[in-house]
Image (tube, rainbow, N blue to C red):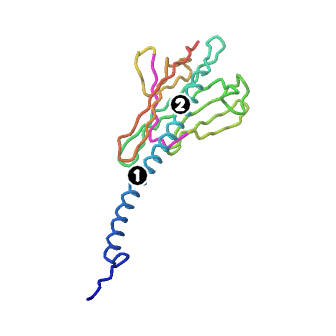
Amino acid sequence: MTKVQSQNGFTLLEVMISLGILSVIFTLLYGTFNAVYRGGEQMESEADKYRLLRIGTYHMANNLSMIHVGSASDGESASLQGEDRERLIGDDAYANDSIQFVSLAHGRTMQDAPESERATIRYVLNGNVLMQEMLLSNGRELSYELGGPIAGLNFRYFDSIKKEWVESWDDTGSNKLPLAVEIEFVLTRKDREPQRFKTWVDLPKSG
């Protein structure tokens, strides 16, 4: 009588099937973790953009709120020039404005400038980076990168006479400031519509 011996272990076919199942499971797990990781990276990148945008907006609003207001009696004139420009990024047109004004710099907000120091301040895009350029009364020039990437920068000015927003401003010799300045940033997002952030700053009345 022939005795059938029991077989221990797995056959080659069973091992191959098991490996195939494990590879499918690992592939699914990798895809899940990779999607979570990329989503976290994207959220972190968006958070950095918004943080830098808030910094840029804070500096602009703070400097504009301390704009130097001229007085007709002392022969000084207010000083604010806003240029309305556009640029192309691919096939799309974006605002590429600049603004320049004289502000009473404060030591807490402007480095290397004593309190009540006047400075000519200019905000402009250099490529896709928001720049703050300053000329102090002692002739020293300073330049800071405030954030990016920014696709568009748009300023509008509320004219107290026309009672409407206008796209550019030049008060040379007129001693006249707008009632408020509107600031708009445009951020591009991959495979999504551009995102727009808008705020405005009330200005002191010129004398």
Which secondary structure class fits the magenta region best? strand
Residue 145 on the magenta span: no
Q: Is residue 95 above or below residue 11?
A: above
Residue 14 position within the rendered picture, expressed as x and y whole percent measured from the top left: 32, 73
Q: Which residues are magenta?
A: 147-159
Q: Nearer the viewer, residue 61 or 163?
A: 61
Q: Is residue 134 above or below residue 104?
A: below
Q: Nearer the viewer, residue 52 or 207?
A: 52
Residue positioned 46% across, 35% down in the render: 153
Give the label, 1 or 2, closer to the camera.
1
Type of amino acid at the residue the image marks with label 2: Thr
Q: Quadrant of residue 19?
A: bottom left
* Disc sitting over residue 15 in the figure: none
List the residue tagged with mark 2: 57
Residue 48 position within the rendered picture, expressed as x and y whole percent measured from the top left: 52, 41
Q: Is residue 71 above or below residue 111?
A: above
Give the Cα distance between marks 1 and 2: 33 Å
Q: Is residue 53 above or below residue 20?
A: above
List the residue tagged with mark 1: 35
| Residue farthest toward the left in the current orientation of the protein | 1
